[in-house]
């Protein structure tokens, strides 16, 4: 096996047995990133100096046998929405193109404490607004499986950095499918944890009540490993759970026999790509063979998840993005500014891309006098019904299975002319975010030579079960082991 | 000519005295910051990714004020974002409370009578709620009190503005009344009482010149007898009682003039020009802000349990009104006297401190505090809490006057000495030889000498000019440096003068 | 409720959000917004008469911080990202009007 396709587990064993040092692993990763990434463009910033320094420190820890975690010395990439002190953090927006945070996100600190090695910051749809990475204000990222296709979004750079072998794990962020959807497009395992399980402090907010930071990895086992080190209460994030983090590996090898798998019927409707549907059906049969009971369940408000999600996201985002005003950080455009308002208008006009502008304006609209009840409040009410759908379903099953996207990765430019059509590609992944429940995306096949993703959706805070069920699947299938180089 | 009455509602923004800011750990003592932009962090400067965390003490103080103003404390209350752009607002929104504030529906009784019944119709406004005793005052309904964060400070320069974020995020309590007040006097009375309560509770220093307490007045007028509510205007940023009264009075007059001339009042936000003493339009209704409030997704709701609220209630000190009534009964003071003493907690405490150490009647203590003591601290622009004279010393001094050890004028001398150099009153009497002398022999000697030295004045007196007597008493006091017991001196003087008449 | 979002409305919300906008952009967004809002209006199908809004999704607990002062950040660090500063202040162009 090549270095760049190692699981965390395999790399960690090599480091522990001194077959390789973290500096060597990091150098190899950096070298590959510099070579390969000109085609993929997964990274916005490659942080050579930081990476080598962290690798050196990891090697010291390993040499002393002190303070070693499964992540010590392991190279990873970070979505460019998460603050890294001293390393440019752009949210792939022109408005933050030269912004270097003065402080670390809690997740950044936690990974540094665990000894992980930051290779660089990955491209995304600007501020997380998009499903293909084509809304990046900087450049497009390409799908390593087919350079003419998108990697998905908004954590497209993160997913591409994994499938192109440019790191051993990636940190993404999922507001409405942004980890799971690109994971599916790029044949990567990834989780959107329960809302509030991972601190959002230092994550540049898109929709505060949905944003969930989650890892992307080569398999469910690694995914559990990374989540273990980034989850937990943070006194700086008042919305983070105070409940103790479970041991995500505790049940991971337990058989799934007798457990109940729910298939939400609303997710299997016309419009799904044939190869996607057959892959999902195949995965269901695999679970049946593993002894799981399969039940059809209903999430009756699924159809409304998309408008609920987008309305609330627009509203929260329009407020969250108000701070980008050209006065304290980031881009500042003040051509002949007579008044401070001119700076606001010019900076935001030049700094934000069209999709960001659309969402900010529609958010202002949904909250404005006379429309609040019809849009924002209505969406919050239907959101309650969406949550209840999941609660009801979990009264009868342990976990739900659904596709991550109706199609495989589409071609660059295919959906950029119609924003609404782009929104529709999130149809299977958005509902979990307003409901707050966790979702684990796993590779489950190929359609027209492009990867197909499925997701397992669990109860609040029950990531443990998702890892167990996901790991069981990956013990009997090898879709997750496929990469553009070996297939 | 039509008689008009004013309809006045007040909003008060009071900074709360916490150590740290509302949503971050930066020091809230911005007024004593060494430099601009030194009490700052990612949270209070609105850096990307930073998140707020609620200051527990601010919630406690807000609850305390709510309880003092007889409000319902909402066990479930939430934060909301108020969205607008201004360079003193780093996030582009202010974290405030909107639908569910921490406190609602309370009241404060004021002494200024409401000249005009009835109160406006509305919840909590029925006349039965007025304090007992017709014409003895009125009840101002508090609509709500909510927590929010202060903005940064802006200094306007010629072609620019300078921003200092030290104040950004300091906790504020906004207290809003119903439009219950009918006169400027009532508004002033209410404002004064709210300030006193905030000071009593230790929530706010009340130093209005530093901007820790700011008023906004909503004003409309209508013909007496009418029950309509006409268009109101809002005067912002009234930073002194003087500005509050002047601006309100001006605005009432202005509106009446407009109606008298057949005009109409437009809803607008006004500012007060302190120099020209006029209200000026800042913003009309058509550019009224659309604040797009929505629940703050970064902060879970506050859930205050009953027991906790009761534990805060237990911390409520005796408030000015209750203290006044107690002073009246306990110390047999007139209501006006008691109200003066309780206007400030430090003064009331000082008074009680002196009374408790003194053998003299409370009335005497009051007259010394209201008189000489206040004169001294006013002249020295001193705060009561900074008075260097211990209540024990002051009590000793007053007692020496009561038991005639010294005279009143010696008392004044000693008080000045105590203020400037401190020390023990009895010691000062000894050192300065100020003890009052009632010894008739000594006083007789002085009186005889004065009569002998001033034959012309004696003649004038005997010719019927009785005011000369006062002059002579003054001469005695001067000669004896105030030590002669004035009663004894007066008796002897009259006696000797009568003898000379013969 | 069916409504189109005309260019006037687009310009109004752009102003609310302090986004500079050209006439052509307003024209383009107007068409897109109408389609999106039309799609959102499907929520009107849902009966929400007795449904409470879900504003707090997870951790309904009180999260309160003790009133302790923590060290502040270095001003020069803060100023590294600031476009214009002067004498310890952040400098912005003239501010007209009130908030
Ligand atoms: Mg306010
Ligand atoms: Zn701060």
Image (tube, rainbow, N blue to C red):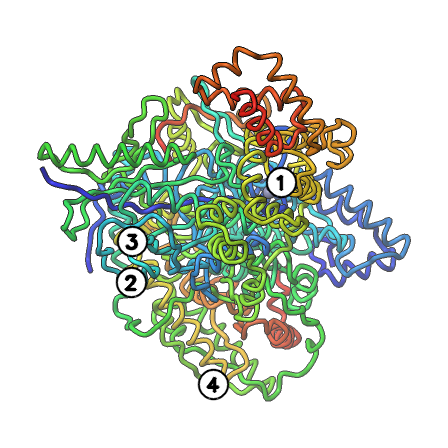
Looking at the rendered structure, the secondary structure element under dot 2 is: loop
What residue is pinned by disc 1? B385
**Distance Cα–Cα, label 4 vs label 3:** 76 Å
**Disc 4 chain ID:** A
Indicate left or right for A258 with B83 as reference: right
**Disc 2 chain ID:** B
- Some atom of ligand 1 lies within 8 Å of the CB belonging to the residue at label 3: no
Query: Percent x, y for residue A342?
Result: 38, 28
Looking at the rendered structure, the secondary structure element under dot 3 is: loop
**Disc 3 chain ID:** B
What residue is pinned by disc 2? B123
**Distance Cα–Cα, label 3 vs label 1:** 35 Å
Contact between marks 2 and 1 (CB within 8 A): the answer is no
Which label's residue is closer to the chain start, 2 or 1? 2
Question: Which of pointers 2 and 4 indicates the residue nearer the eye?
Answer: 2
What residue is pinned by disc 3? B135
Q: Where is B314 relative to A83, above or below?
A: below
Task: Tell me if mark 2 has few (under 14), some (14-19) or many (20+) residues whose alpha carbon lies within 10 angstroms of its own.
Answer: few
**Distance Cα–Cα, label 2 vs label 1:** 40 Å
Labels 2 and 3 share a subunit: yes
**Disc 1 chain ID:** B
């Amino acid at each position: 096996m090549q270095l760049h396709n190692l699981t965390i587990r395999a790399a960690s064993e090599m480091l522990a047995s001194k077959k390789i040092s973290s500096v060597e692993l990091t150098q190899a990763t950096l070298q590959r990133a510099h070579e390969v990434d000109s085609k993929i463009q997964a990274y916005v910033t490659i942080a050579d100096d930081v990476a080598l320094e962290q690798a050196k420190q990891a090697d010291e820890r390993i040499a002393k046998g002190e303070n070693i975690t499964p992540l010590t010395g392991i190279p990873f990439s970070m979505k460019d929405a998460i603050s890294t002190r001293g390393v440019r953090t752009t949210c792939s927006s022109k408005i933050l193109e030269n912004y270097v945070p003065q402080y670390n996100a809690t997740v950044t600190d936690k990974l540094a404490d665990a000894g992980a090695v930051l290779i660089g910051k990955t491209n995304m749809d600007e501020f997380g607004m998009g499903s293909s990475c084509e809304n990046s204000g900087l450049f497009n990222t390409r799908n390593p499986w087919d350079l003419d296709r998108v990697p998905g979004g908004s954590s497209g750079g993160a997913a591409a950095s994994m499938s192109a072998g440019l790191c051993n794990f990636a940190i993404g962020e999922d507001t409405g499918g942004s980890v799971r959807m690109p994971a599916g497009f790029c044949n990567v395992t990834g989780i959107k944890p329960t809302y509030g399980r991972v601190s959002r402090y230092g994550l540049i907010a898109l929709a505060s009540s949905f944003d969930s930071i989650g890892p992307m990895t080569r398999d469910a086992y690694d995914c559990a490993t990374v989540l273990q080190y980034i989850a937990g209460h943070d006194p700086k994030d008042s919305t983070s759970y105070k409940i103790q983090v479970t041991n995500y590996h505790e049940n991971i090898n337990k058989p799934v026999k007798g457990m109940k798998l729910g298939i939400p019927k609303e997710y299997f409707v016309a419009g799904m790509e044939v190869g996607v549907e057959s892959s999902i059906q195949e995965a269901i049969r695999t679970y049946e063979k593993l002894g799981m009971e399969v039940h059809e369940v209903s999430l009756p408000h699924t159809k409304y998840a998309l408008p609920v999600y987008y309305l609330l996201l627009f509203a929260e985002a329009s407020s969250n993005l108000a701070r980008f005003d050209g006065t304290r950080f980031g881009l500042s455009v003040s051509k002949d500014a007579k008044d401070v308002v001119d700076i606001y208008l010019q900076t935001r006009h030049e700094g934000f891309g069209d999709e960001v502008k659309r969402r900010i304006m529609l958010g202002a609209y949904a909250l404005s006098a006379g429309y609040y009840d019809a849009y924002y409040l209505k969406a919050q009410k239907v959101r309650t019904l969406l949550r209840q759908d999941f609660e009801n379903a979990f009264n009868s099953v342990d976990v739900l299975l659904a596709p991550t996207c109706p199609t495989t990765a589409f071609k660059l430019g295919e959906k950029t002319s119609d924003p609404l059509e782009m929104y529709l590609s999130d149809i299977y992944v958005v509902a979990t975010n307003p409901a707050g429940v966790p979702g684990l995306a796993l590779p489950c096949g190929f359609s027209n030579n492009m990867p197909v993703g499925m997701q397992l959706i669990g109860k609040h805070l029950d990531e443990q079960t998702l890892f167990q069920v996901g790991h069981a699947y990956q013990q009997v299938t090898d879709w997750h082991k496929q990469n553009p180089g070996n297939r | 000519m039509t008689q008009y009455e004013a309809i006045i509602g007040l909003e008060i923004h009071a900074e709360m005295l916490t150590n740290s800011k509302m949503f971050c750990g930066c020091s809230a003592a911005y007024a004593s910051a060494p430099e601009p932009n030194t009490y700052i962090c990612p949270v209070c400067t609105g850096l990307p990714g930073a998140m707020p965390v609620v200051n527990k003490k601010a919630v406690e103080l807000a609850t305390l004020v709510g309880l003092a103003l007889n409000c319902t404390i909402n066990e479930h209350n939430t934060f909301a974002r108020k969205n607008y752009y201004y360079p003193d607002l780093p996030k582009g929104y202010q974290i405030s409370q909107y639908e569910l504030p921490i406190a609602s529906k309370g009241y404060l009784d004021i002494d200024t009578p409401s000249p005009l019944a009835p109160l406006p119709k509305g919840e909590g406004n029925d006349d039965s709620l007025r304090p007992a005793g017709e014409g003895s005052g009125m009840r101002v309904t508090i609509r709500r009190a909510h927590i929010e964060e202060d903005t940064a400070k802006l200094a306007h320069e010629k072609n620019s503005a300078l921003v200092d974020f030290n104040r950004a995020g300091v906790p504020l309590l906004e207290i809003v009344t119903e439009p219950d007040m009918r006169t400027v006097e009532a508004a002033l009375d209410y404002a004064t009482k709210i300030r006193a309560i905030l000071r009593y509770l230790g929530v706010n220093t009340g130093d209005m010149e530093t901007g820790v307490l700011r008023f906004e007045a909503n004003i409309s007028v209508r013909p007496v007898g009418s029950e309509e509510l006409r268009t109101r205007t809002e005067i912002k940023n009234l930073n002194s009682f003087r500005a509050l009264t002047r601006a309100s009075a001006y605005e009432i007059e202005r509106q009446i003039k407009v109606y008298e001339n057949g005009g109409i009042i437009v809803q607008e936000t006004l500012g007060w020009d302190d120099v020209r003493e006029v209200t000026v339009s800042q913003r009309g209704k058509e550019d009224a802000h659309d604040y797009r409030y929505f629940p703050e997704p970064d902060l879970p709701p506050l859930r205050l349990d009953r027991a906790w609220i009761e534990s805060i209630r237990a911390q409520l000190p005796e408030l000015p009104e209750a203290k006044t009534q107690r002073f009246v009964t306990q110390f047999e003071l007139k209501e006006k006297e008691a109200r003066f003493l309780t206007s400030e907690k430090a003064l009331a405490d000082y008074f009680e401190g002196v009374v408790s150490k003194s053998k003299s009647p409370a009335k005497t203590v009051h007259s010394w505090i209201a008189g000489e003591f206040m004169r001294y601290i006013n002249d020295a622009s001193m705060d009561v809490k900074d008075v260097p004279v211990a209540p024990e010393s002051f009590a000793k001094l007053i007692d020496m006057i009561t038991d005639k050890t010294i005279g009143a004028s010696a008392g004044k001398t000693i008080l000045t000495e105590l203020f400037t150099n401190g020390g023990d009153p009895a010691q000062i009497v000894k050192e300065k030889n100020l003890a009052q002398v009632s010894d008739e022999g000594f006083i007789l000697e002085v009186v005889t000498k004065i009569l002998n030295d001033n034959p012309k004045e004696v003649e004038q007196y005997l010719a019927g000019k009785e005011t000369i007597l006062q002059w002579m008493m003054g001469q005695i006091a001067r000669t004896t440096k105030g030590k002669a017991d004035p009663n004894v001196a007066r008796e002897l003087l009259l006696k000797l003068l009568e003898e000379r008449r013969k | 409720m069916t409504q189109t979002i005309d260019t006037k409305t687009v310009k109004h919300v752009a102003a609310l959000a302090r986004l500079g906008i050209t006439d052509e952009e307003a024209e383009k967004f107007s068409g897109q917004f109408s389609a999106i809002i039309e799609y959102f209006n499907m929520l009107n199908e849902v009966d929400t008469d007795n449904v409470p809004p879900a504003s707090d999704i997870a951790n309904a607990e009180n999260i309160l911080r003790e009133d302790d002062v923590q060290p502040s950040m270095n001003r020069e660090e803060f100023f590294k990202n600031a476009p214009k500063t002067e004498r310890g202040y952040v400098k912005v162009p003239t501010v007209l009007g009130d908030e």
